[in-house]
Amino acid sequence: MPAKDKIIVALDVSSADAALRVAQTLHGHVGMFKVGKEVFTAVGPAVARNLLAEGNKVFLDLKFHDIPNTVRAAVQQAGMLGVSLLTIHASGGRKMIAAAVEGVRAAAKTRGDASPTRVLGVTALTSLRAEDLAEIGFQGSPEEVVVRLARLAQSAGADGVVASPREIAVIRQACGPNFLIVTPGIRPGAGTSDDQARTATPESAIRAGADYLVIGRPITGAADPVAAADAIAAEMENAFRSR
């Protein structure tokens, strides 16, 4: 798979028109588009449906976190859309994670799809530092918290996790080569960290073992988004070759 197909562009915008303009500009230069809370709250599932209808892959990043039955039902509906990836909070616990997996499998059965939507557990948000995690009750270093949640997600049937670049290597060691790691907090070169606390470059994230990189402002906010995406893909390609 070409490195460009491992780039997920975050559509952190407030309208369907804005999201679709970005997708049209970058179609063929990246592998997937992330539909998150902002645009989903603004326009609902329409933007995901439009992206899929135009031949794009979609990562639905709504971070479901509720009682198991509610999550199962919500995730089943997300799976019916035909998205490739979706997120739940791994901190929701084993029963909730397992319920999400049941939901996407039920959707795949209904759709006659041999490849169910893949479920990713969100470990610790990339905006959280060690002191933030301690304040909300998580014991241990960020690495320890993330590995504990990644192992829980894996044991409950999730396909992978979302984790910061700083924890990729320890997750890969703990969960093995086939566990999917999707990594936000990517900042090429000397880019600013914005509200991300634990960041890395595309090259270092791929070398550490990430499978997909979620990138927003470094591409969508660039003067030439296509050139920015192509440059990141080239950097990733070199990292994959040397991994």
Image (tube, rainbow, N blue to C red):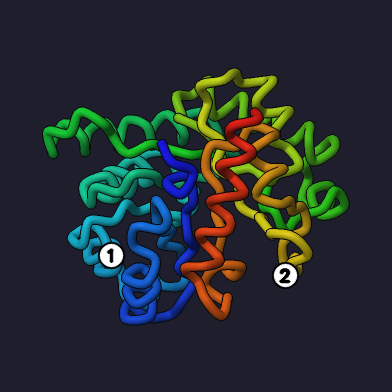
Disc 2 or 1, which lies upstream in sequence? 1
In the rendered image, which residue does mark 1 sit on? Answer: 45
Q: Secondary structure at mark 2?
A: loop
x and y percent of residue 130 in the render? 85, 48
Q: Quadrant of residue 238?
A: top right
> Where does residue 149 sit, x and y in percent of width and height?
64, 32
Question: Can residue 123 be seen by looking at this rendering?
Answer: no
For disc 1, the neighbor class at 10 Å (few under 14, some 14 to 19, many from 20) is some
In front here: 124 or 180? 180
Q: Which residue is mark 2?
A: 194
Q: Is residue 150 above or below residue 74?
A: above
**Residue 155 visible here:** yes
The x, y position of residue 194, in whole percent, is: 72, 70
| Image quarter (top left, top right, bottom left or bottom right) of the C terminus | top right
- Report the side of 200 relative to 58 (left or right): right
- Viewer-nearest residue: 102 or 22: 22
Disc 2 marks a residue whose amino acid type is Asp
Give the residue displayed 49% in from the left and 63% down from the top: 10
Image side of residue 118 versus residue 182, left or right: left
Q: Give the quadrant of residue 177.
A: top right
Q: Kindly identify the residue that appears in the image at 42 percent across and 29 percent down.
A: 98
What's the residue at 68%, 20% (across, down)? Answer: 174
Q: Which numbered disc covers residue 68?
A: none
Give yes or no for contact between labels 2 and 1 (Cβ–Cβ under 8 Å).
Answer: no
| Callout 1 amino acid | Pro
Comparing labels 2 and 1, the label whose residue is closer to the camera: 2
